[in-house]
Structure formats: C-alpha cells, structure tokens
Image: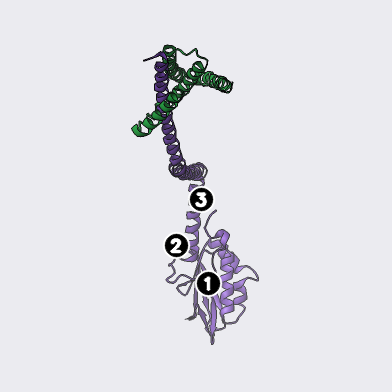
C-alpha cells in the first residue's frame, strides 16, 4: 500500500467515524427534543394544572384556617358573654310571656260588680295600670294574660280572649306589692275612679305568694317576623 | 482519491442509520463536543492534504486525542460546575472556520 493510499484510507476511516458520530449525535438531539416537546405539550400542561389546583386548594385552606384563628381569638369570650346574655334575656322573656310558670309576691284585687257596670274598658284600665306599676304577670279570674290578651264586650258581659268572665272579677298581679297598691289607690287612680260607681267596690290585698301558671296556648305570630338585622339573634 | 473521504463520510452516516445506536441522554453533551472536535480534526486533515503536509499518524492521533480531550474537558467542567465545554466549542469553532477558509482558498487557487 502506497503512502498516498494509506493516507486516503486513513481519511476514509476518520470520515466514516465522523459520519457515524454525526448521525448518532443528531439522533440523540432529536430524541431529546421530542421528549422535551412531549413534556411541554402534555406532561407539563398536566403538571401545571395539577400544581395550580393544589395551590388553589392550599390557598383556600390557609384562608379558612386564618379565619378560624381570628374567630377563635376574638369571639370565644364574646360568644360566651353573648350566650349568657341571651340566656338571661330568654329566661326573662319566657317569664314575661308566660312560657313558664312563675310565682312570687304580688297583690290580689277583687272587683265586685253586681250590676255589671264594668266593661272591657274599665278592666283594661286596671290591667294597664298594674302593668305600668311593674306587674310581671297578671291573672284575671284564673286566666293568665299573655302579651296579646284583650278584653272584649259580649252583650253586658266582659270577655277575656274570647272567654266570658263573670263578676266578681279577681285580678292577681305578681310584682312589688307596695308599688302596685299605691299605683292603684292613688287619688285620681283606677280604684277611686271605679269606686265612683255606686255599686262597684274594689278590695285589694297583698299576697306573699302568688302563682302564675304557664300559658296553655302561646301567642302565635302570622305576619310579624324578626327584622333582618335582628334576625340572627346576635347581640 | 479525493472522493474516498466523502465515501467514508457517507458510509459512516449509513452505518449510523443502520446500527441505530442510542447514547444515554446524560452523555449526549460529551458526544456533541466530541463531534465538534472530530469535525475540526477532519477539516484539518483535508487542509493538510491539500497543502501536501498531511501526516497520517499525526492526523489519526490528533483526531482521537482531540475527540477524547474535548469530551474530557466537558466532563471536567461539569464536575467543577464550570462551563468548560464553551472553551472547546470556541476553540474548535474558530479552527473549523479557519480551516474551512483555507480549504476553500486551496481548492479555488
């Protein structure tokens, strides 16, 4: 083999190796690009979507936990206070509205009216005066008055919540006895006015223990609803 | 005789396609820089041939050592956290263009 042909074959071999390397390298690069493209189009989209969802979820959780932390810090005491306050209010309302039976000191009036001179108006005056003097529960002829009780006239007779009352009328009121009596007997007050009628007489006595039964039928409300701002009972 | 290197190149390309040899992705960088070194060496060989100063021993050893050295520098750079392969890219790139220019002149002369 001559020197020239040796050189030529050497070049031939190296060029062959170069060609092989070029093709291999080109293929590697092509595969890499394809993998990258695949990742970009499908996997990366999925990945980004998943991460985005996860991020949103965690963000929501952070917000919720922050709100919980703030609520816990600021309202635990408030809520307890508010609950005690609400329970007290509720107990008071239950007593006043006759939801529960109540007992205590008070006064008892007996209105004698043999000629049926007294009507719903006069009995209403008595009850209103007792309420004004701070009566906490009122019973007329054994019937407890609710916040919506009303007197009416049925012929010559007086009715209470639609039930006919018969004289003498017994009115019992729970409250501070001295205050109730003084408001009833004061000059120009209810009792002097009633006793201005010839045959009407009123007897009023203190009672250490009066009992007001709870209402059998609590008043119902059809049209009245709690105002929106007070609706949740807050405060 | 001048067509023999071209034939070799075609043969290498054909073998590459037929063999379908896959280089692991982590070694792809070393192969790419080795390809650049090989390209430089072959162009240097062509130039030497045209200048009639060709030495086959010099050429073959140059081809092999340049290729290995380029890959080695890249590997070293990776280990050191330095982009040393850029040095190889620039050195071989510049030489490839220089050799190409000289080869062109020698052919057109």
Location of residue B40 with respect to A143 vertically, above or below: above
Q: Quadrant of the N terminus of chain A?
A: top left
Does label 2 or label 3 sit earlier along the sequence?
Answer: 3
Say which of marks 2 and 1 sits in front: 1
Residues flagged by tags 2 and 3 on a common chain:
yes
Position in image of residue A193 (x %, y %):
62, 75
Picture quarter containing residue A103? Answer: bottom left
**Drawing shade for chain B:** green
Spatial distance from mark 2 to mark 3, Cα to Cα? Answer: 27 Å
- Residue at the disc numbered 1: A148
- Residue at the disc numbered 3: A82
Does label 2 or label 1 sit earlier along the sequence?
Answer: 2
Q: Secondary structure at mark 3?
A: helix
Task: Tell me, yes or no, whether the two marked residues, 1 and 3, touch with CB atoms within 8 Å.
Answer: no
Label 1: chain letter: A
Q: Secondary structure at mark 1?
A: loop
Position in image of residue A211 (x %, y %):
44, 65
Image-based side of A229 in relation to B70, left or right? right
Say which of marks 2 and 3 sits in front: 3
Spatial distance from mark 2 to mark 1, Cα to Cα? Answer: 21 Å
Numbered mark located on residue A103 in the image: 2
């Amino acid at each position: 083999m001559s020197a020239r042909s040796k050189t030529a074959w050497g070049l031939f071999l190296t060029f062959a190796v170069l060609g092989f390397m070029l093709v291999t390298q080109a293929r590697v690069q092509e595969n890499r690009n394809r993998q990258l493209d695949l990742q970009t189009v499908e996997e990366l989209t999925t990945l980004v979507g998943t991460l985005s969802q996860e991020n949103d979820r965690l963000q929501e959780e952070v917000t919720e936990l922050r709100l919980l932390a703030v609520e816990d810090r600021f309202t635990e005491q408030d809520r307890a206070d508010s609950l005690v306050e609400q329970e007290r209010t509720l107990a008071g309302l239950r007593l006043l509205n006759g939801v529960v039976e109540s007992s205590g000191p008070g006064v008892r009036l007996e209105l004698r009216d043999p000629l049926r001179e007294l009507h719903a108006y006069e009995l209403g005056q008595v009850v209103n005066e007792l309420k004004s003097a701070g009566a906490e529960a009122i019973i007329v002829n054994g019937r407890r008055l609710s916040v919506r009780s009303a007197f009416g006239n049925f012929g010559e007779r007086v009715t209470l919540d639609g039930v006919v009352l018969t004289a003498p009328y017994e009115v019992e009121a729970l409250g501070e006895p001295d205050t109730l009596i003084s408001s009833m007997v004061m000059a120009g007050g209810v009792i002097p006015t009633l006793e201005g009628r010839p045959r009407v007489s009123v007897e009023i006595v203190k009672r250490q223990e009066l009992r007001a039964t709870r209402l059998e039928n609590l008043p119902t409300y059809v049209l009245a609803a709690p105002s929106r701002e007070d609706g949740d009972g807050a405060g | 005789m001048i067509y023999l290197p071209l034939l070799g190149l075609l043969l290498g390309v054909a073998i590459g396609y037929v063999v379908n040899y896959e280089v692991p992705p982590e070694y792809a960088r070393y192969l790419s820089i080795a390809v650049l070194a090989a390209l430089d060496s072959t162009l240097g060989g062509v130039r030497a041939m045209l200048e009639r100063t060709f030495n086959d021993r010099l050429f073959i050893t140059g081809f092999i050592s340049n290729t290995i050295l380029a890959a080695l520098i890249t590997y070293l750079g990776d280990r050191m956290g330095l982009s040393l392969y850029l040095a190889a890219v620039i050195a071989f790139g510049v030489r490839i263009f220089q050799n190409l220019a000289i080869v062109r002149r020698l052919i057109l002369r």
